[in-house]
Amino acid sequence: MTGRERFRETPLAGRHEALGGRMVPFAGWRMPVQYTGIIDEHLHTRANAGLFDICHMGEFYLRGKGAADDVDRLVTCRTDNQADGQCKYGFLLDEQGGVLDDLITFRISEEEYLLVVNAASLERDRQWIESHLSPDTEFADESDRTGKIDLQGPKSEDIMIQLLGPGALSALHRFRCRYVKINGVRVLLSRTGYTGEHGYELFFPIESTETLWDLLLSYPPVKPVGLGARDTLRIEKGLPLYGHELNEHRTPLEANFERFVYWDKAFIGRKALQQQKQQGIRQRLTGFVCEGRRAAREGYAIFQNEKEIGIVTSGAFSPCLKKGIGMAYVNPDRIEEGASIQIRTDRAEIEATISSVPFL
Amino acid sequence: MIPRNLKYTERHEWAQKEGNEILIGITDCAQDELGDITYVELPQKGDKISQGKEFATVESVKAASDIYAPVSGEVIKVNETLADEPGKINESPYEEGWLIRVRISEPAELDGLLDADAYKKLIEEN
């Protein structure tokens, strides 16, 4: 394949090819977009369990006496009440309130935090975070040494119980993590994910990636799932994707995620965000459902009564609803559940209605 | 899978001659490249199509693609089942997944299309 050498590969590249995975470029990596088909993998994850190679994402550790305060200042969510083994979703903002990345912070202990960041924004995140640390905090980018696999779907808990025994998962609630041993490998097991299903994210030393992948795939309900279905799964649940719903020109208020902004603390970007809250926002993120199977795509313009009122950020055919669905930035005064909109493409006009997310 | 009895275009459409009627669809290679097809927009009976011009849109989960006419003519039938079951194109691109039937207006256009060997070579080169 031409240009193959320009892309990085996870330890599972050979596994993906052997499984019939179709490899595509993604954020500088060669990743599988699908194996058997996006719809099949999507529905399998909703009904059984899907296995995802997520080794491309970044893992930053902040350690030391300054770590807790630094994390608290860097991210928008509340962290002063974060327990050991608790995960929190939040945003990394610039001084203007623009979103540099969305991420989950894992409090491992009082003096150790893990930040899991997107592959596409990893380099910029690292520079930003490193330049905003106190002398008491030690920063380590362990992305190259860390393997990550997600197991998602209603059957994932049964599989974990079979692997670890029933006691190992007790009180591992949503957005909680703990270290477990799988086949002698120390794994950080987290009840988080990007599909909206019951599921787990596993972090471990990268040299164990193939062993753990093979082990999890050996359970009959488990099938490998590519980035194509990862995208449709997250869209159905209204989960944002950095570079689409979120970027440095959008704020958490515009993205309708004020619930992940904790005003009662000092965080980078707070001043700009507070100013925006007082002045009001020009556009806000919402969902929409198309009338039929035809899907709107990123960049398509949204109209209402011949007036342009917004733009699509993500759109796809929903395998569960069998309709086009998507997310869009729309003038806030036009966001009313069930309101009719028209989405214009160079090919056609798609009738759709405004809908809150998640779609299911 | 490249049936010997069909003619092909460089854009991966196929044409099957039945007297002066031509059945048109997209190839197995095209459906595989597109992935799961979720929506098809076809012309209507009576519409005229021209060789090399787009006449239909096929959408997969990931993207929308134009389909170009292998020959010129008048649409005499469209595959109605694709409205509810566009996945037929994935399952059976040369049979149940056909798109339209046309009455050809320039029969000589067929001679300019690729035969199975030439189309196979084209795929192998890409």
Image (tube, rainbow, N blue to C red):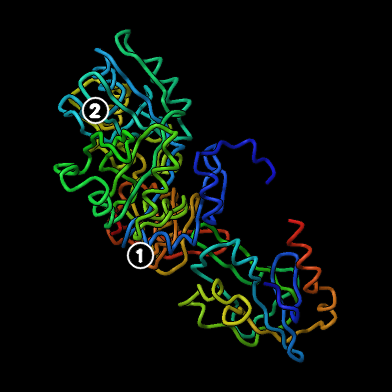
Q: Which of the two residues, A131 or A347, is positioned nearer the viewer here?
A: A131
Q: Quadrant of residue B14?
A: bottom right
Which mark is on residue A320?
1
The residue drawn where x is 57% and y is 59% is A346
Inspect this view and state whether residue A79 appears.
Answer: yes
Q: Position of residue A17 (x, y in %)?
A: 56, 51
Q: Which of the two residues, A175 or B48, is positioned nearer the viewer here?
A: A175
Cα–Cα span, label 2 and label 1:
35 Å
Q: In which quarter of the image is residue A191?
A: top left
- Tag 2 and tag 1 share a subunit: yes
Q: Is residue A86 left or right of residue A95?
A: left
Label 1 lies in what chain? A
Which mark is on residue B49?
none
Q: What residue type is labelled 1?
A: Cys
Q: Where is residue A184 in the image (x, y as percent from the top left)?
A: 32, 36
- In the rendered image, the vertical position of residue A325 relative to residue A243, given as above or below: below
Inspect this view and state whether residue A307 appears.
Answer: no
Q: Name the residue under label 2.
A: A107
Q: Quadrant of residue A29?
A: top right
